[in-house]
Amino acid sequence: IVRLPLASARETLAGLAFGERERHVGERVISEILSRLDVLLALGLGYLTLDRATTTLSGGEAHRLRLATQIGARMQGLLYVLDEPSVGLHQRDNARLIRTLQSIRDAGNTVVVVEHDEETIRAADWVIDLGEGAGAAGGRVMYAGPPGSIDGSLTGRYLRGEAEVPLPAARRAAKGWLRVLGARAHNLRDVDAEIPLGTLTAITGVSGSGKSTLVEDVLHRALARRLYRSSLEPGRHRAIEGAETIDKVIAIDQSPIGRTPRSNPATYTGAFALVRELFSLVPEARARGFKPGRFSFNVKGGRCEACQGDGVRRVAMHFLPDVFVLCEACQGRRYNRETLEVRYQGLSIADVLELSVDAARALLRSHPRLARLLGTLAEVGLGYLRLGQSATTLSGGEAQRVRLARELGRRETGSTLYLLDEPTTGLHFDDVRRLLEVLGRLVDAGNTVIVIEHNL
């Protein structure tokens, strides 16, 4: 039974016959099992088997499984808060998700959904639109009311059709073909796929259909082994043809860019090394003999030793997650007093790290390399991020765009294959428009971009 697809398992269990003595026990157990299977089927997971290892599930499948756990409880009077439940879902699955959320509401619960998906916004009973922009430009309620009359905000303009993500006037012609032959990993059934080089290619299909397996497990790992001698085993396939013209393969995903408070957009993109170099050239720093390393919070010398440059102190809570509190010695500024006395245009290095990307661009516009790196962050819609913002506070969408900005800041080779897994996750309509402009620039420079995506 556990090896059957859920739809078949339900039929089998529903058809079980019990004797008079067994029925009192059996019927209650079976009804509980069937009610849980019905929730999974309603969420479009009827093709999964009960013994399927959770490590093999796609992001969308795992998301719906967690949702089914809650819905199966059949409780009333609860407040459900969901953060972008449409992530990883095809339009077909999205419609099922909306019906499921409405059934939770109809059972006597309140459902609050953080969402950018147009279909979900239109299906809501009430919409609260925050804006207008991001970071310091946000934090205001632009609209609260029924979805049919959203006015006075960027979201409303997109929903009314006054603004839109434009379609390209012409499609690019292929500059050759990359062929994946006989892919048989996970649930791929001897798949052959042709990908045009020098174009933007979208890999789409319902959740769990094998998109990530094809692109990440087979294509990416096979090319990484060929180009970089990677030790990761590619998914089973017969051959990959046409890869001779590709000299780099770069996967840009939504995993964190760092797991400690020291990691931030400035360190990840390489901008921080240039800022430290700039501070070491200030007359005050040269008089004191301060080198670029003095302005690093990762090495002894210029950093605050009480928190070792983190700006926060970790308090171990044993059975609870660790708590971070502001460092009493440096008040979160990360550096010791002597280092903070060195100033560039009136700002210490801690002040520069507190600047937003847009403000830092204005301050450092006379430095070409820094201006270029900060410009790429602004182009992907991250002008509101602080340079020293801890990587642990970035969302998955922000982390992916920081990665994209780092790649844009590098010197182009024109023969790179970029792989992105659902880059529109967590993005507003206007952010999607910007993202497509950036990806278009990568393709126009002679690169190939493959995007796993459900966003229309």
Image (cartoon, rainbow, N blue to C red):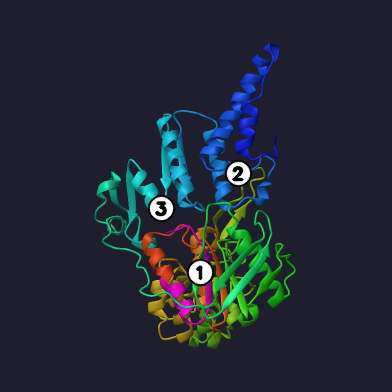
In the rendered structure, which segment of residues is drawn in magenta? 437-456
Q: Identify residue for label 1.
A: 201
Is residue 182 visible to the viewer in this orientation of the structure? yes
Name the amino acid type tagged 2.
Tyr
**CA gap, disc 3 and disc 2:** 25 Å
Q: How many marks?
A: 3
Residue 451, x across and y down, in percent: 52, 66
Name the amino acid type tagged 3.
Asp
Marks 2/1 in contact by CB < 8 Å: the verdict is no
Q: Is residue 241 left or right of residue 43?
A: right
**CA gap, disc 3 and disc 1:** 22 Å
Q: Residue 452 colored magenta? A: yes
**Sequence-first disc among 3 and 1:** 3
Identify the secondary structure beneath mark 3. loop
Identify the secondary structure beneath mark 2. loop
Q: Identify residue for label 3.
A: 117
Residue 72, x across and y down, in percent: 55, 32
Residue 183, x across and y down, in percent: 67, 62
Q: Is residue 122 left or right of residue 303?
A: left
Examine the rendered structure and indicate whether residue 177 appears above or below residue 288.
above
| Quadrant in which the N terminus appears | top right
Examine the rendered structure and indicate whether residue 321 appears above or below residue 361.
above
Q: Residue 149 colored magenta? A: no
**Sequence-first disc among 2 and 1:** 2
Please tell me the numbered disc located at residue 47: 2
How many other residues sit within 10 Å of disc 2, few (<14), some (14-19) or many (≥20)?
Answer: some
**Sequence-first disc among 3 and 2:** 2
